[in-house]
Amino acid sequence: MVHPQRRLPHNISFFFTICTFLFNATETNAADVSLKQVYKDVDVDSKDFVIHDPSRIITKGGKQMIAVTGEEQADGYNCGIETWYRKQNSKSNWKPGQCLLQTKPSWIEEEIPGQEGAYWAPELVKDNVMLYSVAGFHVEPAITCLGIARAEGKFPKGLTWVDSGKPLTCIFPNDYEYEQSIIDPSTFVSFDAKVYLVTGGGTIVGVELDPNTYHPITGDWYSPNTTEWKKLARGPKVDDVKGGHDWVEAAYVHPNPDTGYYFLFVNWGTCCSGVDSTYNIRVGRSKNPLGPYKDKNGKKMNKGGGSIFLKKRSYMIGPGHISVHRGKKEKEILSFHYYDKRRGGKAWIAERLLKWQEDGWPKAGKIVSSYEL
């Protein structure tokens, strides 16, 4: 299918310059190449390591893994998506894992003719299932889609990832009066064991997924008149922006059975500008997995509501792309990226304990792991 295209939002355009390579489902079953070797080939010093848009942290067999956005393609670098790993809850730094997705799946050319790259913000649904974002930024406005890949092999450094062969959904911008993208996917499991997707830029949307295929349970893509897909959040109200709201992205839902609420975290502000980034994380809650979500003042997030949860602190500028995992003692731990003032604004991943206040709202606790020079 060929569809009209649209302009990408300003605050993610920098990271849309990543490389053009994804793997093909017909490739051999050899494990994806070592990221460490790719870095060696292009002479990347460890002081310049960058982690941006980290997935949730996946733990298996005493090891932990994340998937992250690749960097700009240059000087022989050819990774659209990277994995990083470490020993479980280790205080040591994350280490380069694998370079993924080196041949573009055929469905991308069908949906986004001439697409040159931009595979980013992956979500590890589990240790062998990944969702990822794709954009056609070569013309304006641009189409955005979500892909699905599955892995076989030894976790975390001996995996081979194979694309599913078709997109989960795409958005075609001429269908909308305001800027709208399908980016930054994340998933969660409801209290009644159903699987949901939250995704989007400009507007955050959600839908129930088939737990086997990870496609929408109805089989329908998102569209302006959809009923199965729900609009969960918009950015803050801004009069001089078309559509009346500023940008919002990087959505993540965390269910809390103790309170009976689902908590929706989103990012406002501008990412990808180093120490000048204005990213901050907002939160709201709902008794229903697909909303409506309301902030502490009762304002609906799909009307521009959102209570501040995490903002810049000391050397950690522009926190964003949050997720939650559990440590060895079953404590809930937040992970997110930030722009490190000590390293000239290079992005890295940090973790903080997730605390719950007496009023039932979440709070970021002490830092439990961060990059140190």
Image (tube, grey):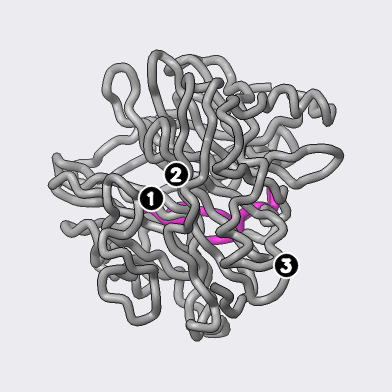
Q: Residue 48, position in %: x, y?
A: 75, 31
Q: Residue 219, position in %: x, y?
A: 31, 64
Q: Nearer the viewer, mark 1 or mark 3?
A: 3
Which one is nearer the viewer's eye here, 83 or 295? 83
The residue under label 2 is 322
Q: In which quadrant of the rendered image does the N terminus lie?
A: bottom right
Segment colored magenta: 265-281
Residue 121 horizontal side relative to residue 339, left or right:
left
Q: Could you tell me which secondary element the residue under label 3 belongs to? A: loop
Residue 75 horizontal side relative to residue 335, left or right:
right
Q: In which quadrant of the rendered image does the C terminus lie?
A: top right
Residue type marked 1:
Tyr
Q: Residue 141, position in %: x, y?
A: 64, 76
The residue under label 3 is 138
Q: Nearer the viewer, mark 3 or mark 2?
A: 3
Residue type marked 2:
Ile
Q: Could you tell me which secondary element the residue under label 1 belongs to? A: strand
Q: Is 283 above or below relative to 341?
A: below
Residue type marked 3:
His
User: Mark 3 vs mark 2: which is more N-terminal?
Assistant: 3
User: Mark 1 vs mark 3: which is more N-terminal?
Assistant: 3
**Marks 1/2: CA distance?**
7 Å
Which one is nearer the viewer's eye here, 148 or 250? 148
Disc 1 to disc 2: CB gap under 8 Å: yes
User: Mark 1 vs mark 2: which is more N-terminal?
Assistant: 1
Q: Residue at x 37, y 57 (%)?
A: 198
Residue 119 horizontal side relative to residue 258, left or right:
right
In the picture, the disc for residue 252 is 1
Q: Residue 242, position in %: x, y?
A: 54, 84
Residue 89 lies within the magenta run? no
